[in-house]
Structure formats: structure tokens, C-alpha cells
Image (cartoon, rainbow, N blue to C red):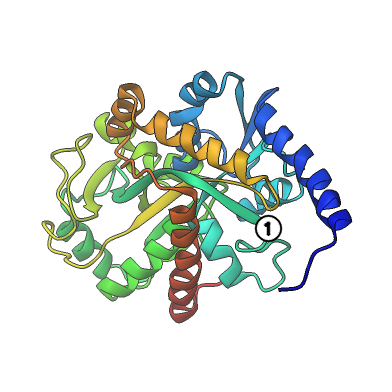
Amino acid sequence: MPRIPRRSLLAAAALTAPLAAWAEAWPARPITLVVPNPPGGGTDFAARLYQDTLSRLLGVAVVIDNKPGANGNIAIQAVTRAAPDGYTLLLQYSGYHAGNPAMMPNLPWDPNRDLVAVGMADVAPHGIFVAPGLPVTTLADFIAYARARPGRLNYSSSGNGSIQHIAGVLFSQAIGVPMVHVPYRGAAPALQDVAGDRVEMLITTPSSAIGLAQAGKVKALAIASAARIPALPQVPTTAEAGMPGFTVDAWFAVFAPAGTPTGIVQRLNQALREAAATPEVQRRAEEGGVLLRPLSAAEMDALARREVEVLGRTIREAGITME
């Protein structure tokens, strides 16, 4: 083994010592958690689910900064360009993280190169919600209604390439009926137009739709997951409703700019996992219809990389584009 000059070792120690001290002193001021959607959707819910508990555990304020637009790219790019000091973080949505690279060849950020995984916020099974004015009460009713009107029904989403968009395409293909995609700048406005009978269907995370469903302002026809959710116990799964095999799940996770010191990433991950173990976060997660799945930073990184590959392949095979 070649000998490393002592002078080089001292130089390396001089470079790493400030980083270690920096990580040790962190956090010393408020942390900004950037959300790539407007208030009211599943991404915003995930951020607010942890906001207060993280603030208490870290001893500094956690400030949520909603930056919607450009299919999440405005917020994501802002974080990738931020200083890697642990004070600017991203609450990332799996649809943007894995979907955008598959649809945008000139994307100014790369999920594997420009972001480092911190940890999981929550996993959200999706529900099939339809407009209150439709003459349907079950998923089978809606499928029959759509088949009698090929190409005349609309489904909304939080943007091109979002999980809602992909789910709508796959649903349309599964029932053999063309439907028209109507993209919005977030799940909240997409859902409002379903509630207003301007769009017929939205497949989205229950957290953004539970209140409207409980109030009768949208109809919840099925949960596209393996099990029912406690927040909407009367709503069957897609398998129970006669559509086995149609499942849609998304994840929401915290990422930091590439180059963020490992010590900071690990401390953030620990805080996220401690927060997920608190009764308050667990209660709110159940009420919001999401699942808590605490992961290490390495586990989150592996899951995200796998999603980039698998979801990207699904998008390409389904011919989904940003148009």
C-alpha cells in the first residue's frame, strides 16, 4: 500500500474538521421544508404531519414553503440549487421524483445525482373519487357509466406525470374506455373541480379528499390498495369492488441537496423516525388515510432509486407524456 504523506493527511483533517463541527452545531436556525404543491394536497399534508413534532425534536422552527408549478420542478430545482447545509429540505412526491425524469429529457435536475434521501414521511394508498352529481354509487356503476360514454368523461390530476395522471391512464386502459386528462397545479384544485361537478373523476390520496367524502361533496368509490383505510372504513378496496389487481400507492419523503453532510442527514432521519413514533403523528396519519413506514436514509435511497427505474418504465410503456 502506498504511503500517504503526513502533510496530505493533515490537509484532509483540516478540511473534514469544519464539516464535522458544522454538522455537530446543526441546527442553529429555522429549517425550510419546501413543498412542490399548493396547500391542501397529499404532499402538503405530509409536510404538515411532521412540522410541529420535528420543530420540537430539533429545537428550531420548521417552516413550510409551498412552491407549486411546473409539475413540481420549481420547488425541486430550488432545493437542488440551495446550499447543502441542512437548512433547505424538500418534501418530495414519488410522482415527481420518478415520473418527471421519464417524461422530460432536458430536466435540469437528476433524482439520483442532485438529491440525497433523508427519510420517508408517509405512504399513501389512493382512492377513486367521483363527482357528487354522477348517477353512480359503486365502482361497477361508474365503469358502466364510463363505458356508455367513451371519450366523454374527464379525470383530473395534480399535473402531467403525477401518480394521479398515471393512475387515470391505467384505469382508462383497464376498463377499455378512453377518458380525457385534465391537469391542475396540485391535488387540491383538481379535487375542487370534481366536487364542483366540472370533472368526473380523480384518483388521489385520501388525505386530501376525506373531508369532502365525509361531507358528501365527492363520492368515494374504492381504495386502490390491499386494505381499507380506517378514515373511510365503509369504502371497499378495488378488489372488493370488482377490480382486482388495480392498486395505486405513492410515497412522500424528505430529501436534501446533494452534498449535505452525512451527520446532518442521519440526524434528520432520526428525528423523522422519532416523530413517526409519536401518538400525535400516528393519530393524524390514521385520520388522513396514510401509512407510516419509517426507513433509514439508505433504505429510502434504495426505494427511491428503484422507483425511478420502475415508474419510469411504466410511464414509457404507457406512452404518458407531458403534453
Q: Residue at horizontal 54%, vertical 22%?
A: 55
Residue 323: give x, y in percent of width and height. 60, 69
Q: Position of 309 compared to 116: left or right?
A: left
**Image spot of residue 300 (x, y percent):** 46, 53
Residue 124, compared with residue 288, is above or below; it is: below
Task: Quadrant for residue 243, please give it.
Answer: bottom left
Q: Return the residue nearer the eye: 157 or 5.
A: 5
Q: Looking at the picture, how far across and down is residue 254, in whole percent?
A: 53, 44
* Residue with the mark numbered 1: 114
Q: Residue furthest right?
A: 7
Please tell me which residue lies in front, 242 or 298.
298
Q: Nearer the viewer, residue 8 or 92?
A: 8
In the image, residue 208 sits, relative to residue 53, either above or below, namely below
**Direction from residue 279 to residue 300 in the image, left or right:** right
Answer left or right for 75 relative to 289.
Answer: right
Which residue is drawn at the image coordinates 46% and 47% (left, top)? 252
On-image quarter of the N terminus = bottom right
**Residue placed at 13% from the left, 57% from the top?**
241
From this view, report whether residue 49 is shown above or below residue 161. Answer: above
Q: Position of residue 29 (x, y in %)?
A: 70, 22
